[in-house]
Amino acid sequence: MITYPVFSYQKAKRMVNHQEKQTPIIEIKGLNVRTREGEILKNINLKIPRNKIVVLLGPSGCGKTTLLKSLNRLTDLHKELQVSGEVLIDGVDILKVSRDLPAMRQKMGLLSQRPFPLPVSIYRNVAYGLKLKGIRNKDLIAHSVETNLKRVGLWDEVKNRLNSPANSLSIGQQQRLCLARGLAVKPAIILADEPTSALDPISTRIIENLFKELKEHYTIILVTHVLRQAVRLADHVVFMYYGDIIEQGHPDDILKHPKTEVLKKYLVDGN
Amino acid sequence: MNRIRRISDLLVNIWMRAGLYFLLALPVLIGVGLYWKAAPIIGGHSLRDLLFSRQWFPMKGEFGFMPFIYSSAYVTVLAFILSAPLCLFAAIYLTQFGKHRLLQVMLPVIDILAGIPSVVYGVWGVLVIVPAVAEYVAPLFGVASSGYSLLSGGIVLAVMCIPYMLNMLIEVFQTIPVGMKEASLSLGATHWEMVKHVIIRKGFPGILSAFGLGIAKAFGETIAVLMVVGNTLDISVSPFSPGYPLPALIANNYGEMMSIPDYDSALMFAALLLFVIILIINLFFRYFIHQTEKI
């Protein structure tokens, strides 16, 4: 008589979750971005693992931001850019979707170099994405606004002035507001483009600590050219140079034992 | 050497200050000058009669400016209604949806339109708009019209205002940070939702500014309107009726009717009225811009 192994539901779920965690959340295949003047990204192939902080490192103008913006197709705003290849978000090529593009973009919260609060109140900034999602229940929106402002440690600072214009906040507060706004739409990925470059050391530390907490639930792709930030935060480092990925791997490997001369030079000059 | 540098520094400073004070004083001087020349008619008639009376009989000494104010306001509002939405959507399309190349082609075209002398617009109005209104538009509404009408004036004015408003709106929309658009799109907005929530909202003070400029320009425009509006004293709701705006009154009569007592002063009063109305329009828009910038 044949005996079949018996799996419990929890065990099966754990296995599925484990399998899911092993599959990359983003897979980039042969991504090229070019303008009339030349190539910005050259045949990029990259797998972004789930629930990790992936740092895109490299000198200014190496294509880090363009790569980041290709992931949620914000390159569409720059009509001079020609994008080809595949960017698979959970298996769906974002470069090929048309009708579902806004929903796909909601999977990726964006944090820019400089905070860009929308020209509305603090409350409406956080509620904005929810309304775009079609959520009309005021209690639900209010709850989400409070939860996400608490999550980024901003609630106590703004709870008495939620209807004030968002641009009345300090730059550090604005950046946290933008993070709360992004988190409110429940993304799976956070795209952060040098999010601390305009911030003072205290605000920088707050954002970095938030990232460490958030990676439990989110995949964070962080663009930076601050080596020390990469060391502090990265689970996986991707070093880029002139539109190419030169090296990638665990920070201990590639930052302490660089294989290429370019990275060695960058680490010396960067430090 | 140091002394020469100090003196040149001082001279430049004085020159700049003098220029600035002159510019600041200019509107005041114009206002005072017009008031001084209009003083005889202001002293001889009540302001209420001058502004609200329909009686315009200079030979009898009756100077009611109401028909002129009405015509000016009518053609201005009409021009605004016809041109403002067109400019707004054209500017949005050119800056947010169209290819950069299209904008590059359009900008010199807009500059050319702005540079055309108003008399050319007037001639175009007489040759194209007036016959079109008489032969096609008025019959559509079952009205007989010579074509020389408030509508023709409004259309010609609208076309004249377009380059100014469009140019300014394009500049306003181009200054909105890309990061703000990216923020909206990344939160799941469609392109149009981004335009609605970010571009129009953020650019609102600039939109008001452009509209204010358009209205002020339309209100003061003289020659082109004068050529197509009919120059007949009338207060009619119908856009197919002729009108007689304030600038046309001044341009038609200045230097010719000076034998009539107080006529000179009445025309100066018309100029003062124009000046004050445009000042009020500007202040009104400035106030709204200030209010919206607080948001």
Image: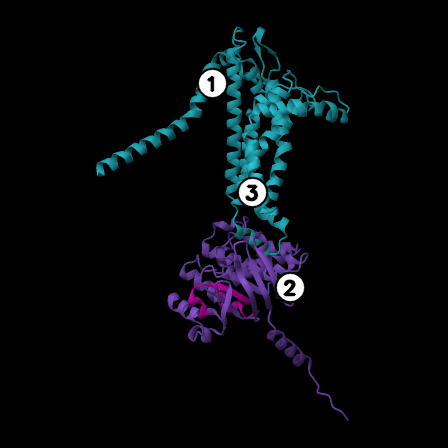
Chain colours: A purple, B cyan
Camera-side residue of B265 and B176: B176
* Residue stretch rendered in magenta on the structure: A210-232
For disc 1, the chain is B
Using the image, determine if residue A189 lies above or below residue B287. below
* Residue behind mark 2: A93
* Residue behind mark 3: B104
Between circles 1 and 3, the one closer to the viewer is: 3
- At horizontal 59% and vertical 58% (from top left) the residue drawn is A83
* Residue behind mark 1: B34
User: Could you say where residue A233 lies in the image, as x and y percent from the top left?
Assistant: 47, 69
- At horizontal 43% and vertical 58% (from top left) the residue drawn is A199
For disc 3, the chain is B
Numbered disc 3: secondary structure = helix
Q: Is residue A227 magenta?
A: yes
Q: Amino acid at mark 1?
A: Leu
Using the image, determine if residue B17 lies above or below residue B172. above
Q: Amino acid at mark 2?
A: Asp
- Label count reads 3
Q: Quadrant of the N terminus of chain B?
A: top left
